Image (tube, grey):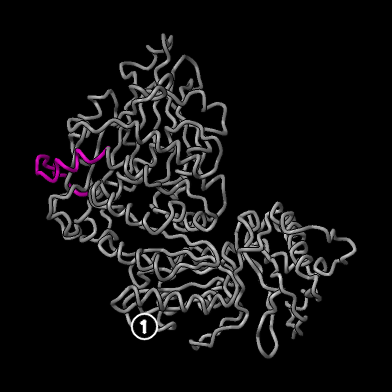
Amino acid sequence: MAGIAVSASPAPAPSFRRSSVASRFSPVAGPSANFRTQVCGLRCWIAAKLKFQKTLKRHGWQLRRNLEVRADDKVPDWLRVTPLTKNITSQDARLAYDSGGETANTSSDTLDSSMDEKSLTHLKLSTSETHPPVLKEDPVLFDDQPESAASLCIAVIGATGELARNKVFPALFALYYSGFLPRDVGIFGYSRKTITDEGLRSMIEANLTCRVDHHENCDEKLNEFLKRTYYIDAGYDNKDGMAKLNSRMSHIEGNCAANRIFYLAVPQEALLDVALSLADGAQTTQGWNRIIIEKPFGFTDLSSHRITQSLLSRFEEEQIYRIDHLLGKDLIENLTVLRFSNLVFEPLWSRTYIRNVQVIFSEETATEIQGRYFGDYGIIRDIVHSHILQTIALFAMEPPVSLDGEDIRDEKAKVLRSIRKLDLEDVVLGQLKDNSVKVDRYTKSMTPTYFAAAMYIDNARWDGVPFLIKTGIGLMKNRAEIRIQFHHVPGNIYRERFGHDIDLDTNELILRDQPEEAILLKVNNKVPGLGLQLDASELNLLYRDRYHVDVPDSYEHLLLDVLDGDNHLFMRSDELASAWNVLTPVIHEINQNRISPELYEAGGRGPVNAYYLAAKHGVRWDED
């Protein structure tokens, strides 16, 4: 419902049996109530909008009213509700009931009774869009009876999988604990396993490893969270399963409007069946719907395009959130903050001052990466296509018009379209040797586990600047950082003081997420004492020393963004296609077995050819 309006036919005023909430609303009686109810609705809406503007902007969930109707449970025609225009939303109308009961009793003497239907149309109060509410509650179909109707429902599809158990549910609980989810939220698990609500709750509790485990009141909050968690047995037909999910959600939501988020933690081969069944059978018509899709986003450019077109046939682009948990790191969010809010950096952010950019993401042998998943998709589809290219796009984009998600995604898309297609001579692939029991079975295939490349962005700002990327697993340590190396000082009069290694006098800005979060700036400095000895020192901001706060998990960050409708860290369809255009030539050559990965030892630095590649483009990897 987006607002209240009236029908033309008058009806006698009903009697109401009021609850504690409903008692705040007093209906206007009498045949002339049709006009007064509409105007009062507008006035209530304006008052509520001003009062709750900040809450609505942040959360978007609605406050509730409960109207308990006597005996015949019928709503008189003059009190029927109808959606207004988009200017008056369902949240606003509901807030008007909660905050404007006294406004509804405004004397008719203060109202201009000469206002006709044409005037109401001018005020965007449509009397033709009739959509009466169902105040009578459906028969109870489930044993559970929630204490309050849910204003937000979140469904985790694939709830018994590893991702849901270890990441999604702990992140949802952390948000609930911190107050970022409404207390009346409904959490739903959906999968094919035959378990009960209590079975799901036990599974969540057993796997809860989130950061708030030992905080005060954690047990109390956990019990509240688990009480609002429900399980849906999907069976083997997703159409029937989604119908059951929708019915269960509707029961929890009651007769109030509510929003829904669907997290699709499912394999790629099941994605379309689940998503399309969801679109047809589980979306709400009483609020917004948003779906979260896990990477990788397709196997090739063609398969990705087919998936995108299928999704867009049932969903709007703004409903789709393609999630990459690596983009939820503070390092990524800090890219734009550091650049656009500091005058000292913004003028330097171009080919005029920057010599090269290195994007490095490496992991030790990761036991959490399953062989089947990595063997099918490899590091290019898993890491490079989304995380690396999105990092480069955020780093290199032009200043957006605003911080609105679409404005930022517009600029990212321009960067991705400007990236030159990869030359095979500028790519190094590596394969982890299978010579240890610690190495997983994905190493028995030819799937690359290491990728290094030199990329170029063909635009005015970055023309000629090499972006060196390096990512792999089974390396010597976990490392995630961006290194920006600046040009040498022209005609540097201190050059002789650095000896033969002129790279020592290179200023460097380092944005690091691992091994510990930090911002480092390498500058040249005189060593204290007699004589003139120079040293390259680091000015450092270590987060652990400066900020004594718990760092949220990246899933918490991104789920909160979905809840808020902030999509700037999620790939849009055109970004997705542009990223595939960059990588498709390399993937095609791999598929034709024309590129052989170089073997490298676990715990080492990776393929030797990566160092020759860097030297070819005038760059030296900094290995710390």
Q: Residue 144, position in %: x, y?
A: 51, 85
Question: What stretch of residues is rendered in magenta?
Answer: 582-602
Position above or below: 545 against 181: above
Q: Is residue 592 magenta?
A: yes
Q: Residue 44, position in %: x, y?
A: 76, 62
Q: Is residue 411 magenta?
A: no
Along the horizontal axis of the image, is 117 left or right of 571? right
Closer to us: 489 or 111: 111
Position above or below: 436 against 485: below
Closer to us: 68 or 217: 68
Q: Residue 217, position in %: x, y?
A: 60, 72
Closer to us: 437 or 311: 311
Look at the numbered disc 1 and give the secondary structure of its residue: loop
- Give the residue furthest to the left: 593
Residue displayed at 60% across by 81% down: 147
Residue displayed at 55% across by 26% down: 344
Residue displayed at 83% across by 58% down: 114
Q: Residue 406, position in %: x, y?
A: 49, 43
Position above or below: 591 against 506: below
Amino acid at the residue labelled 1: Ile
Disc 1 crowd rating (10 Å Cα; few below 14, some 14-19, many 20+) is few
Along the horizontal axis of the image, is 425 left or right of 96? left
Closer to us: 612 or 537: 612
- Residue that carries the numbered disc 1 in the rendered image: 195
- Give the residue furthest to the bottom: 71
Q: Quadrant of the N terminus?
A: bottom right
